[in-house]
Amino acid sequence: MFKLNGYTLGERTIPIAVMATGDLTVTRRNHDATGNVVSPKDGLPVFDSASIFLAGKITDKIGGFAQFTYSNYDHQGSDGQWVGHWASDNTDFRYVDRIIGDTSDLILGTTVHNNPTVQDVWNTAPAWSYPYLSSSTSAVGAPQFLPIMEGALAQQVVGVGGYLYWNRTIYAELTAYQTADGIWSFLSKGSKAGDLAHPQTYVRGYNPYLRLAVTREWGPHNIMVGAFGLNVNVYPNDPNEFPIFTQGVTRYRDIGVDAQYQYLLEPNTFTAQARYIRENISDPNNLVYGDSQSANLKSLRLKASYIYQAKYGVSLSFFNVTGSTDTVAYAGSANASPATQGWTPEIFWIPVQNIRVGLQYTHFTKYLGARSNYDGNGRKAVPRPAERSDHKREI
């Protein structure tokens, strides 16, 4: 409700916060069949990133959330040295009005943001979903290929939309996305055309996103069931990462369903979440896919967590990515496949409200279409554990 009301609840204060994250990653069999290192900095504690937040109430009806992040191990330069990087991060500004009557409670709002689903208020949305943090240096720490809605447009676009929430029951939103350039370039700060490490993604025109959800609360229980869809047309970049506006676009159409259940009654908190996205891809000019002019990609994530006394927690997540094969789009796979599947159990401790320490283990049962020799060089879909510290807290 705080977010739906435009971050305006409460008193106006100095709205600055900071965050830092670090991790230690250990990868089993950290060399491929040719002897190349798979996960640099393996077995070493590293300082991942730091963020500055400016968030809260501006007026009684206007509020916002802005994040700027420094990534310490952002990428490796041509000399093999790690390079740090400052960039815009999740940002969401809102104007909201709330109309409360004898039998109705209606929230009407507008939002301007830079990451599809960052405006969402449920942790099933890709921008806020598990895993909240993964290794910053491991190349195999997570699925390589996901629907475009699951992060590829983050800090690349600007979305302007409107939403309503009626009687704490029905939520509906319609947003249009365009490239975050020109007057909107502050939302994609850190990315630009021609930057090989951080190229700008350009989309054609206005690209619609629709979100519907039904919620219900009773006692310590609450449940949400929803659906969403995004249609986006993306221009290709040339080998130097400059956009090509003359060769057409690749169209991605993502349709998804999600659900969340929570039991919130101290000292116990239980959360269960599910999300499924199917992406249909039309690539008539073979800009991304080489074997066909149409393809699909499907992503499933299930997750459950339990927290005791807001301090001690366990969680278990399952992920499964499948899709059509393509020798160009998935050149790193010996099977030309994006199919990746695995489990992520985690235990964590929150000694004080602002610190969380966890031990997370990712067990791949399939990686890029196979359990063994997925890259043609003998590499297997083996587990990857990671110890971490981060700021996220489920409530």
Image: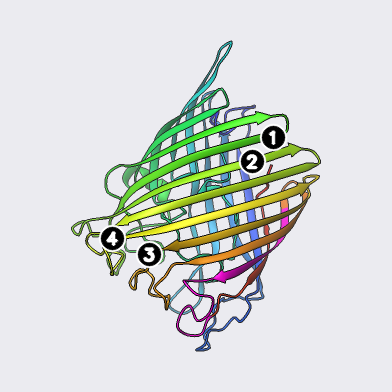
**Which residue bears the numbered disc 1?**
221
* Occupied quadrant, residue 245: bottom left
Looking at the rendered structure, the kind of residue marked 2 is Tyr
Q: What is the CA distance from the residue labelled 3 to the residue labelled 2?
A: 32 Å
Residue 346 rendering spot, x and y as whole percentages? 70, 60
Looking at the rendered structure, the kind of residue marked 3 is Ser
Pointer 1 or 2: first along the chain: 1
Answer whether labels 1 and 3 touch (C-beta < 8 Å).
no
Answer whether labels 4 and 2 touch (C-beta < 8 Å).
no
Q: Is residue 283 left or right of residue 2?
A: left
Q: Quadrant of the C terminus?
A: top right
Which stretch appears magenta?
356-379
Q: How is the image coloured?
A: rainbow
User: How many other residues sit within 10 Å of disc 1, few (<14), some (14-19) or many (≥20)?
Assistant: some
Circle number at residue 66: none
Answer whether labels 3 and 2 touch (C-beta < 8 Å).
no
